Image (cartoon, rainbow, N blue to C red):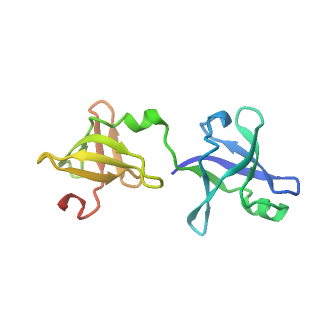
Amino acid sequence: MLRIGKVLKSNGTQGELVMSFLDILPEDIDLQEPVFIEFDGLPVPFYFESFTPRGNNRALVTLTGVRSLKDADELSGADVFADYFEEEDQEDFTGWSVQDPEGRLVGTVSAFEAIPGNPCLWVQKADGQEVLLPLHEDLLKEVDEGKHLLTLVIPDGILDL
């Protein structure tokens, strides 16, 4: 998931929040998709019920399930994440080579699979078989744009299927 902002503070007594956004303009937020806030280490989805931009990087928002000052105060200071990719980003790796951290070639990216919460790459191996590999930031070790090469940690057993 991509960190897109932060809940700055509550606003009023009906659960409204003031959010700031990082490297994304409020008008670029997909209001039909959920945003996520972590509770006890787990991402919890919230949908926008209202969204009013306030300047270049802030908005006054109401989220589902946040109905009181107490609820809003509980979210104050929390990071906000999104779990969707821009369409142009999805195609960037098609045709790129994939290798493991030891430098062994795995194959070539043939497609992007936008599985909610688990984006993946279809990779065609040298033997012609395709394998679905997770594209998670913890597994992505290096992106070499000049060589069109991704270095991914490959979870055990995936390539054996």
**Residue farthest to the right, as pictured:** 13
**Residue farthest to the top, as pictured:** 146
Q: Quadrant of residue 90?
A: top left
- Give left or right: position of 93 versus 61: left
Residue at 67% x, 56% y is 78
Rendered position, 127 above or below 90: below
Residue at 42% x, 47% y is 114
- Give left or right: position of 16 versus 85: right
Rendered position, 1 above or below 110: below
Residue at 72% x, 46% y is 19
**Residue farthest to the bottom, as pictured:** 40
Residue at 84% x, 61% y is 69
Q: Residue 29 versus residue 101: which sits nearer the camera? A: 29
Q: Residue 31 in the image: state x and y as whole percent.
A: 64, 43
- Give left or right: position of 129 versus 144: left
* Count of numbered circles on the image: 0
Q: Residue 137 in the image: state x and y as whole percent.
A: 42, 51
Q: Residue 71 in the image: state x and y as whole percent.
A: 78, 63
Q: Residue 95 versus residue 116: which sits nearer the camera? A: 116
Q: Residue 144 in the image: state x and y as whole percent.
A: 31, 36
Q: Tell me the quadrant of the picture where the C terminus can be found.
A: bottom left
